[in-house]
Amino acid sequence: MTLSAVLLVGGESRRMGRDKATLEFGGRPLWKRQLEVLHGLSPETVFVSARTTPPWLPNDTKLLLDEPPSRGPISGLAKALAAIGTTHLMVLAVDMPFMTPSEFGSLLERATERRGVVPIIGDRAEPLAAIYPVTAAADFQRALAGPDYSLQVVVRTLAATDKIELCSVAPENVHCYGNVNEADDFNAFPEFGA
């Protein structure tokens, strides 16, 4: 099993009112923190998926720009899966600052040569902190070409065809999958210190 990684930063941050990737969290901008989580898992290549070139783009990453019109995260995932030269792609959204290296590492431990892992909380998949096999590329391309851009639908298709395992998140780790869309969302987790 070989790994690539992608940081998804393509959102427009409308509710936040500014670029979420540059928000400070724990003394670092979100983009830097999230890339540190991904680099800590030793991928061969790290991509940044965005709608436009971010001014903070590090030299040790490769940029993937969404093809217009962007269809949200599904556009970035389809492009990243088409670009990798490895068997698996680790995916992390920039607005999930509570993800820990140990929680992401536990997902990686469940991945196999032919299957990825998508965490699930209740009956809802968390497709933006997950691991996909390169064989899922065609499924993402089909979804991107269709009328429904829901990642939940793509994930269910991948699970039904045994390309991913749906992995229940332990109650004590549910907070790792929280995301920030508004400034007040940081306040929900004061122990992390924005």
Image (tube, rainbow, N blue to C red):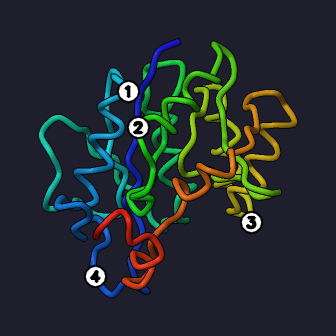
Q: Is residue 169 shown left or right of residue 9?
A: right
Residues at marks 2 and 4 touching, judged by CB atoms closer than 8 Å: no
The crowd level at tag 2 (other Cα within 10 Å; few <14, some 14-19, many 20+) is: some
Q: Nearer the viewer, residue 84 or 176?
A: 176
Q: Residues within 10 Å of mark 3 (few under 14, many from 20)?
A: few
The mark that comes first in sequence, 2 or 4, is 4
- Is label 4 or label 3 in front? 4
Give the CA separation, mark 1 to mark 4.
Answer: 29 Å
Crowd band around label 1 with a 10 angstrom C-alpha radius: few (<14), some (14–19), many (20+): some
Near mark 4 (Cα within 10 A), the count class, few <14, some 14-19 or many ≥20, is few
Disc 2 versus disc 1: nearer the observer: 2
Q: Which residue type does callout 2 highlight?
A: Pro
Separation (CA) of disc 4 from disc 3: 29 Å
Q: Which residue is mark 1?
A: 41
Cα distance between the residues tagged 1 and 3: 35 Å
Tell me the tag on residue 147: 3
Q: Tell me which numbered mark, 4 or 3, is placed earlier along the sequence.
A: 4
The amino acid pointed to by label 4 is Arg
Kindly identify which residue carries mark 2: 101
The residue at 76%/58% (across/down) is 124
- Whether label 4 touches label 3, CB < 8 Å: no
Which residue is tagged 4? 18
Distance of mark 2 from mark 1, alpha carbons?
A: 8 Å
Choose mark 1 or mark 4, whichever is in front: 1
Q: Contact (CB < 8 A) between labels 3 and 2?
A: no
Gap in Å between the C-alphas at discs 2 and 4?
26 Å
- The answer for how far apart the CA atoms under marks 3 and 2 are is 35 Å
Residue shown at the point (82%, 43%) measured from the top left: 157
Provide residue 8's location: percent of width, then percent of height.
41, 53
Q: Quadrant of residue 169?
A: top right
Mark 2 and mark 1 in contact? Answer it, CB < 8 Å: yes
Marks 2 and 1, the one that precedes in the sequence: 1
